[in-house]
Amino acid sequence: MDFGKAFTFVFDDPDWIKKILLVALISLIPIVGQIYLAGYGLLTAQRVIRHEARPLPDIEFGDCLMLGLKAIVIGFVYAIPVFLLVLPTIVSTVFISEGNSGNGGGGEAIFAAILVCCNILIVLYAFVLAFAYPAAEANFLATGRLGSAFKLGEVWALIKAAPGAYLLVFLGAFIGSFIASLGAIACGVGVLVTSAYTIAFTGHLIGQAYNAAISNKALM
């Protein structure tokens, strides 16, 4: 896996300035722009998976929008355990608060234990999700079937085949969020450009990680 290539591949495209600027402008559209942006990253990943010579996509508004919507579906399904854990966290917080104000009926210690356990589980699941989500997205992109994102055995097999690659995706996402924030230096306008670059950069890493996993599985 070539981590550095994810940073530089954008500049290999002779039309990269036009593409990144147009993506940045589209991202200004309320709601639709953010869905498009997510889809643009997935389309980048898909082109890397398919070994396209120049993986930076053209605008392709309809395709990116559909991919973005599917990314939301994938994200929502994988976030369901978090929702289920947040509910007892909220309930426990309310009971503890009432107990501290003297309106509770006792049992604050039990609710405090539930609160701590749920928070720990949320953190652990968020860590797992950081690896599973890009693998799920890539499995969907490789097959073209949304259901492939939820085949947990296949998703786990990808991570198991290339854990180092998915660790780089995790680190890349962290670095990407920092790069995106640098745009704030330009009075906020630059955020649009850096966000467009970051989504392409992250997509490239997701595609590379999938290819690395498939390659490693073939050697096993």
Image: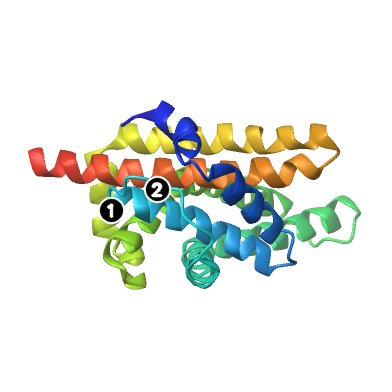
**Residue sitting at 52 percent across and 73 percent down?**
62
How are the residues colored? rainbow
> Hey, what amino acid is under mark 1?
Arg
Q: Residue 83 at x, y = what percent? A: 59, 64
Residue drawn 42% across the image and 43% down it: 204
Identify the secondary structure beneath mark 1.
loop
Q: Amino acid at mark 2?
A: Pro
Residue at 25% from the left image edge and 39% from the top image edge: 212
Front one among 144 and 56? 56
Q: Quadrant of residue 104?
A: bottom right
* Quarter of the picture holding the N terminus: top left
Point out which mark residue 11 bears.
Answer: none
Against 185, is 137 above or below? below
Can residue 66 be seen by looking at this rendering?
Answer: yes
* 195 lies left or right of 76: right
Name the N-terminal-most of marks 2 and 1.
1
Towards the viewer: 203 or 164:
203
Q: According to the image, label 1 marks what residue?
A: 50
Label 2 SS: loop
- Tell me how many marks there are: 2
Residue behind mark 2: 55
- Left or right of 197 in this view: 181: right
